[in-house]
Amino acid sequence: MPNIYAQDLPKTDANFAALTPLLYLERSALVYPDRVAIVHGALRQTWSQTYARCRQLASALQQHGIGKGDTVAVMLPNTPPMVEAHFGIPMSGAVLNTLNTRLDAEALAFMLDHGEAKAVIVDPEFAAVMSRALAMRQSTHPVLVIDTEDALYAGTVQRIGSQTYDDFVASGDASFAWQLPDDEWDAISLNYTSGTTGNPKGVVYHHRGAALNAISNILEWDMPKHAVYLWTLPMFHCNGWCFPWTVAARAGVNVCLRRVDPKAIFDAIRAHKVTHHCGAPIVLSAMIAAPAELKQGITHQVKSMVAGAAPPAAMIEGMEQLGFDLTHVYGLTEIYGPAAVCVKHEAWDALDVGERARLNARQGVNYHLQRNVSVMDALTMQPVPFDGETMGEIMFRGNITMKGYLKNPKATQEAFAGGWFHTGDLAVMYPDGYVKIKDRSKDIIISGGENISSIEVEDVLYRHPAVMAAAVVAKPDPKWGETPCAFIELKAGAQVTAEEIVAHCKAHLAGFKVPKAVVFGELPKTSTGKIQKYELRKVAGSSDAIDV
């Protein structure tokens, strides 16, 4: 029999609109026009002003021939232009590409070429490296370069663009009639991840996923209207875990922070009554370790969200002593940042801090609007038993998953094999349905919340004329969580010091990717000559691996 509900019930503009987080800005500007949206130094910018500026930015981009399917890159810290970029650029139909401000010129040049950026907005702090990156591009198509200005930047200002950001925005129409995406599957942003190879992969987000993850953030955190959110998490990282769009949905306050340090964090929390902030473990550890005088005078509840390495007992206890409520989340660039959360239960409150840490160290369950997270046997594609012992791979499926890797169908197909996104992280599933990582993907080092490809570092090491064989693994670090540890087997008769190896790496890598420890000796290998990294991890975790 025919489906009676499929007849004469058309999808029209009256009963369907593409999901997009851009609508969150439009609504907040309409409902709360005079509420503060952005705080930065002396700046207090309302939601109506922010909406007008984002429309101007979109209009100005279109006036320069930039629109649907074009890429606009930004090299910005957590400042007002970065907030505006998350709305104004996609309002023009273009795709926002937030560049990691810690990268070197070579990596940035690759991203500008690969993403085919038509324009780039640059903060003065990063003008020098961006100038070098633009000069290193292989592509010949022109790039519109726009310089931002910031009274809080104390360094030397180098102009590399054709105009300033404020002048560019002012040239646009504040009443610009931006359009919803034709399809909520349209790309909204491009984020590069180092993945498991030296060349970064371009992760493409869609409007639907961004809208849903932004709302999931609200649900996981019980985030109220007008929350005051402090930007201790880089907005270049997974679009700030979608929080620029989350804050807009709640008509909250974006408290910008150019540079993350404990004094600036605690000063901002006191001054603006910050209610929420996110960060890598290194940020929270720095807050806990800060001098007592910096922490005085905070009498209201602050919620902290942490991802990366599981929070140890000392971190949970330290945050509790500060009076902060800690939420542990898990995710990757490919799933819009966090898409799983370790949901806490009231019964846990009665447990000692060690047991709470054990429970809270798990990666948890799926976000509200992510369909599922599971631990699967990668060969059979069947879920592992819920016994807390059987290992499998963490996999996700649902709306909060990337469109795929830009210009890389092979990697996309591999990532989505069997109808699930493969994270590469090995884990177990507990009887209560909570996931717990047991081992990271072998090639990835997570340092201060940043992914470092061991293969990329190894490639640089192999360029040194004295190196016969090289392997890089993660070395536990109390500050960064993990840092690269290089194991090097020298060519016969060759001599080189650890300091020379580090200097060689600094010439070819961003600073955070440079090995912090170097160990010389014959590398353990299988009968087929494959280096046994699991043996090296044991050494990296011992005192035998001395920092340089």
Image (spheres, rainbow, N blue to C red):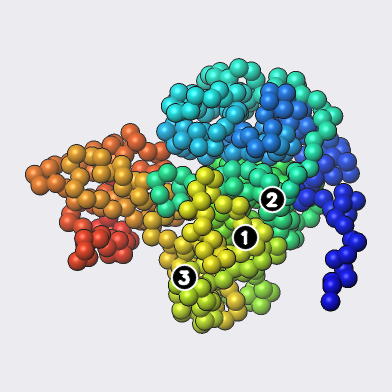
Residue 225 locus on image (x, y percent): 81, 52
* Occupied quadrant, residue 94: top right
Spot the residue most to the left.
493
Would residue 313 be visible to someone looking at this image? no
Residue 8 locus on image (x, y percent): 91, 61
Residue sitting at 61 percent across and 57 percent down? 401
User: Where does label 1 land, which residue?
Assistant: 339
Would residue 182 be visible to someone looking at this image? yes
Query: Which amino acid, by three-letter code, is at mark 3?
Result: Ala
Residue 112 locus on image (x, y percent): 52, 33
Q: Give the mark nearer the N terminus: 1 vs 2.
A: 2
Labels 1 & 2 near each other (Cβ < 8 A)? no
Q: Give the mark nearer the N terminus: 3 vs 2.
A: 2
Q: Nearer the viewer, residue 366 or 252?
A: 366
340 in relation to 231, above or below:
below
User: Where does label 3 land, which residue?
Assistant: 378
User: Where does label 2 land, which residue?
Assistant: 185
Residue 128 locus on image (x, y percent): 48, 24
Residue sitting at 25 percent across and 60 percent down? 530
